[in-house]
C-alpha cells in the first residue's frame, strides 16, 4: 500500500493550483478576445449604418431641393411670394423618411422656424 507523503501532497496541491490559475487565465483571454471582437463588430455595424443614413439623408435633401426648384419654376411668375412659400411648405410638411420622426424643417436666415413639423405654434 502506498502512502502519500506531506511533500507529495504539497506538490499535488501546487500542481492543481497552477492548473486552475492557467485555466482561469486562458478563459479570461478567451472572454477578452470575444468582447474585443464584439466591439469591433458593433463599430463596423455603426459605421455601415452611418454611411447608409448619410446617403439616405443626402438623397432626401436633394429631393426636397428639387421639389422646391420645380415649384418655384412653375409658380414664381404667377403667384405672390407668400403663396408660393406656403405651397412649398405644404409640399414638404407631409414628407417623412425612415421613421415618423424624420422630417424636413426650414429656418430663415435669422434663425426663425419657417417649417417645423412637430409644433404648429413654432411654425413661421
Image (cartoon, rainbow, N blue to C red):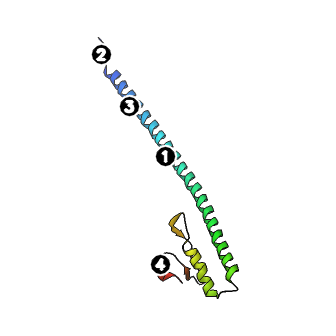
Gap between marks 3 and 2 measured at Cα: 22 Å
Q: How far, Cα to Cα, is label 1 from label 3?
A: 27 Å
> In the image, residue 93 lies at what x, y percent?
55, 75
Residue 63 quadrant: bottom right
Decide which of 38, 58 is in the foreground and name it.
58
**SS category of the residue bearing label 4:** loop
For disc 2, the marked residue is 3
Q: What is the distance, in whole Å, between disc 2 and disc 1 at their CAs?
A: 47 Å
- Corner quadrant of residue 16: top left
Q: Secondary structure at mark 3?
A: helix
Residue drawn at the location 58% of the way across and 82% of the way down: 86
Crowd class of label 3 (few under 14; some 14 to 19; many from 20; radius 10 Å): few
> Is residue 91 visible to the viewer in this orientation of the structure?
yes
Which label belongs to residue 17?
3
Q: Which of the marked residues, 4 or 3, is nearer the chain's N terminus? A: 3
Dividing the image into 4 quarters, which one contains the N terminus? top left
Q: Is residue 5 above or below residue 81?
A: above
* Residue on which the image places disc 1: 35
Q: Distance of mark 4 from mark 3, alpha carbons?
A: 67 Å
> Which residue is under mark 4?
119
Q: Nearer the viewer, mark 1 or mark 3?
A: 1
Crowd band around label 1 with a 10 angstrom C-alpha radius: few (<14), some (14–19), many (20+):
few
Of tags 4 and 2, the one toward the viewer is 4
Amino acid at each position: 500500500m502506498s502512502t502519500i507523503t506531506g511533500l507529495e501532497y504539497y506538490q499535488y496541491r501546487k500542481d492543481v493550483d497552477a492548473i486552475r490559475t492557467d485555466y482561469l487565465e486562458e478563459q479570461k483571454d478567451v472572454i477578452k478576445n470575444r468582447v474585443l471582437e464584439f466591439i469591433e463588430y458593433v463599430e463596423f455595424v455603426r459605421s455601415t449604418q452611418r454611411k447608409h443614413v448619410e446617403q439616405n439623408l443626402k438623397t432626401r435633401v436633394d429631393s426636397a431641393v428639387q421639389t422646391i426648384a420645380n415649384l418655384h419654376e412653375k409658380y414664381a411668375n404667377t403667384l405672390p411670394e407668400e403663396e408660393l412659400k406656403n405651397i412649398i411648405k405644404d409640399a414638404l410638411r407631409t414628407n417623412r423618411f425612415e421613421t415618423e420622426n424624420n422630417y424636413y424643417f426650414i429656418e430663415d436666415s435669422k434663425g426663425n422656424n419657417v417649417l417645423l413639423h412637430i409644433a404648429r405654434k413654432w411654425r413661421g
